[in-house]
């Protein structure tokens, strides 16, 4: 590890701490030559499958690309950055757990939409309109109709809340 200030390779670790729920180790280091301090982060190299696009191209999984798409869908919506981060982490864990070498982008897109539907319905519709690239308003309306039907089924499945009796 070279010092970012003087490029000397000799340094010592002053402090080590776990961060991000133990998945990253943060190390404070001091350069032995210039005595300046800097921080490094160490994480396990995660092996993700290649993503197979609709046109057959293959590309590496890009966490930032997914996060940016979620941010765009949730722009001006009451969805926190922590919720978006958790969504991406869930999908990353799912991809690693699959143990596949290649995964179709459609399966990832469906996972994103499923999670967005639970987080914020407006964000879900925004994402779906881009992801599914609706050709006309009737396709868009069909998606909205399905969403409303899902809501109605969920509403009927929940038992009614009865107020407590005054005694």
Image (cartoon, rainbow, N blue to C red):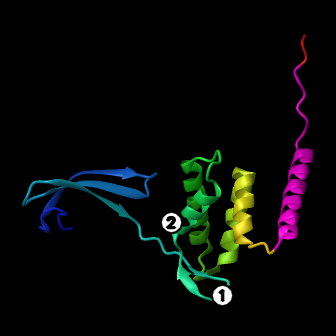
Side of 118 where 165 appears, left or right:
right
Taking the magenta stretch, the answer to whether it contains residue 46 is no
Q: Residue at x 14, y 68 (%)?
A: 7
Where on the picture, by quarter, is residue 164?
A: top right
Name the quarter where the C terminus is drawn: top right
- Whether 94 is drawn above or below 51: the answer is above
Side of 96 where 15 appears, left or right:
left
Number of marks in the rendered image = 2
The label on residue 55 is 1
Name the quarter where the N terminus is drawn: bottom left
Q: Give the range drawn in magenta.
A: 136-164
Residue 135 visible in the snapshot: yes
Where on the picture, by quarter, is residue 132?
A: bottom right
- Whether 143 is drawn above or below 54: the answer is above
- Whether 5 is drawn above or below 133: the answer is above
Residue at the left extreme of this rendering: 33
Q: Which residue is drawn at 69% across and 55% down?
A: 123
Q: Which of 95 and 152 is in front in this view?
A: 152
Taking the magenta stretch, the answer to whether it contains residue 163 is yes
Residue 93 visible in the snapshot: no
Q: Name the residue under label 2.
A: 64
Q: Which residue is drawn at 59% across and 50% down?
A: 83
Please report contact status of discs 2 and 1: CB closer than 8 Å, yes or no. Answer: no
Q: Position of residue 86 (x, y in %)?
A: 57, 54
Chief SS of the magenta region: helix
């Amino acid at each position: 590890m070279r010092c970012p200030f003087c490029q000397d390779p000799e340094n010592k670790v002053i402090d080590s701490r776990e961060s991000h729920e133990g998945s990253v180790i943060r190390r404070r280091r001091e350069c032995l030559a210039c005595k300046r301090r800097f921080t490094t982060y160490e994480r396990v190299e995660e092996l993700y499958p290649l993503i197979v696009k609709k046109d057959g191209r293959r590309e590496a999984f890009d966490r930032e690309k997914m996060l940016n798409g979620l941010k765009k869908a949730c722009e001006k919506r009451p969805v926190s950055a922590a919720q978006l981060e958790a969504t991406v982490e869930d999908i990353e864990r799912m991809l690693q757990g699959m143990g596949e070498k290649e995964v179709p982008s459609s399966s990832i897109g469906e996972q994103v939409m499923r999670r967005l539907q639970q987080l914020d319905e407006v964000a879900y519709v925004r994402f779906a309109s881009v992801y599914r690239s609706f050709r006309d308003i009737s396709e868009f309306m069909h998606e909205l109709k399905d969403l409303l039907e899902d809501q109605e089924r969920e509403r009927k499945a929940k038992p009614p809340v009865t107020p407590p009796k005054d005694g």
